[in-house]
Image (cartoon, rainbow, N blue to C red):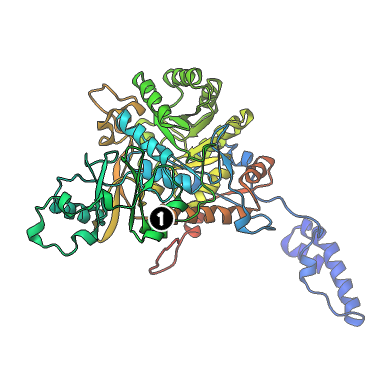
Amino acid sequence: VVLNLSLKYDNTAIAVLWFPRVLSAFCAGRRNSTMEPRMNMAEYLISGGTTYVPEDGLTGRQLFSPHEGLTYNDFLMLPGFIDFGAEEVDLTSALTKKITLKTPFVSSPMDTVTESNMAIAMALMGGIGIIHHNNTIAEQADEVRKVKKYKQGFILDPVCMGPDNTLKDLMSLKKKFGFSGIPITDTGQLGGTLRGIVTSRDVDFLGDESLDRPLSDLMTRREDLVVAHYGCTLEEANQILQSNKKGKLPIVNEKDELVALIARTDLKKSRNFPLASKDEKKQLLVGAAVGTHKDDKDRLEALVSAGLDVVVLDSSQGNSIYQINMLKYIKEHHPDLQVIAGNVVTAQQAKNLIDAGADGLRVGMGSGSICITQEVLAVGRPQGTAVYKVAEYARRFCVPVIADGGIQNAGHITKALALGASTVMMGSLLAGTTEAPGQYYFQDGVRLKKYRGMGSLSAMEKNGSQQRYFSQGENIKIAQGVSGSVVDKGSMFQFIPYLISGVQHSCQDVGGPSLTRLRSMMYSGELRFEKRTQSAIVEGGVHGLHSFEKRLF
């Protein structure tokens, strides 16, 4: 057989290669034909020790060593060993050198993403919100103050009316906000002396002929009201409501001025938030963004007075003398205030800001869904590479990194964290939620909310956004963002738990019981990655179906 094979193919190497194996198989076959059952042919075709496990995938260093820009979609993490439940995964991570969060989520300082409502929701769910600065100093400070004064179940900014307002005014307000329990103060605003309250019980049976009647004639007067005094706990307020069978409970100070309101319907919906981000005074954590110009020093002072916990120096390119000088100013005048600098995408940029005293770094340039910096200015870096390179350098100085931009789903969050980021900053992912600023509207039967980049022309009509892109004072504005819309995502109190669960399950699949362990696995080479071709990306998504419905939670 060997001779014929070698003659047929005129290749003696084949005969030399196969002769020992064929002879062995032949002899074994002869023995087995008379003494033992014949062995499976696979045993002759598969060889190798049973203890051998081939090396699979790439380490983080190998993944990014070819010096090519990778985004989150360009790679996957390979699965590891599971010996813990997904609910056991610890998502605790550092925001700055001195601030730790129980969930690694940060909302972006954009005027269509983060104001007080979003910041409150983020803090209650274990993250933190950064209030945008595309507004006046007083407006931004007031938003920070609302977060710091927030108490669960207390309405700190109730809609108020004055005694001279009419029933018609009340009906318009009810149509707009969907409720009719309105406190009446002498000024018509929060902080005025409480005069009474108008509820649906007072106006339900009134006809059109009463539309011009003043609320002073219709309201339940102050002497007939049950009130609670400022400083009472939520439990005490709840007991007062239950014992007096009232729907609304005004909270007043020693001057009988209205400072808050409690509604029975809100108490019914009250929940516990064990992950809530709080300071040593048990107040919610909140951050705010400022620019790097002279008037931003006045803005900073107002924010500090309002109770700010962390300030973000907001610039599309943070490696500038302006930001370094501002950073040094803050550290000199407010040494205990935590400062997040950025944005950066290279180690050299990070070095300059770390040397100036940054407590955290914000990483990303041109990767956001509404950002066109890379397209218009040809400057930036793919987000996956940017996060890995900056985090790998910053970790040597114990400076946490925030992955800002490019986050489209829970999988992207885990990838950013696995590449070394401590937290992720989200804009478009949160913009469609109930707590984001703006009103919903319908288009082609879809419920939407407006979302715009801070580098868009519409946003740069205000000075705060212009400063971020170094465009203030210029006659010609260079847009680095666009305006658009995003689909309604519902309340943050349903959306954030979905993201938390998604990250926990992702960490479980790769064998990381905590985010600290996940990063340790990446740097040690235990966590392996795989690059994806375009065909692999298509295969990894929904494909081959005539139609489908994609519901995430």
Question: Most extreme residue toward the left, as rendered?
Answer: 209
- Which residue sits at x=38%, y=68%? 547
Question: Neighbour class for label 1 at 10 Å: few (<14), some, many (≥20)?
Answer: some
Q: Residue type at mark 1: give it.
A: Ile
Q: Name the spot of residue 488 as percent of width and height, x first.
A: 34, 55
Compared to 79, does 60 lie above or below?
Answer: above
Q: Nearer the viewer, residue 502 or 92?
A: 92
Q: Quadrant of the C terminus?
A: bottom left
- Report the side of 313 relative to 136 (left or right): right
Is 180 situated above or below 450? below
Question: Quick check: 283 above or below 543?
Answer: above
Residue 316 visible from this viewpoint: no
Q: Secondary structure at mark 1?
A: helix
Image position of 411 with respect to 344: above or below:
below
Question: Taking the image as drawn, is residue 243 in sight?
Answer: yes
Instruction: Assign the N terminus to one quadrant of the image.
Output: bottom right
Residue 303, image quadrant? top left
- Can you give x and y, in whole percent of width and height, for residue 24 in the image? 87, 67
In the picture of the structure, the residue carrying the numbered disc 1 is 240
Left or right of 388? Residue 21 is: right
Q: Is residue 225 left or right of residue 212?
A: right
Which residue lies at the image location 25% right of the left edge and 53% below the top edge?
177
Question: Which residue occupies the extreme front position in the image?
Answer: 223
Q: Position of residue 180 (x, y in %)?
A: 24, 56
Nearest to the observer: residue 66 or residue 418: 418
Quadrant of residue 52 within the rendered picture = bottom right
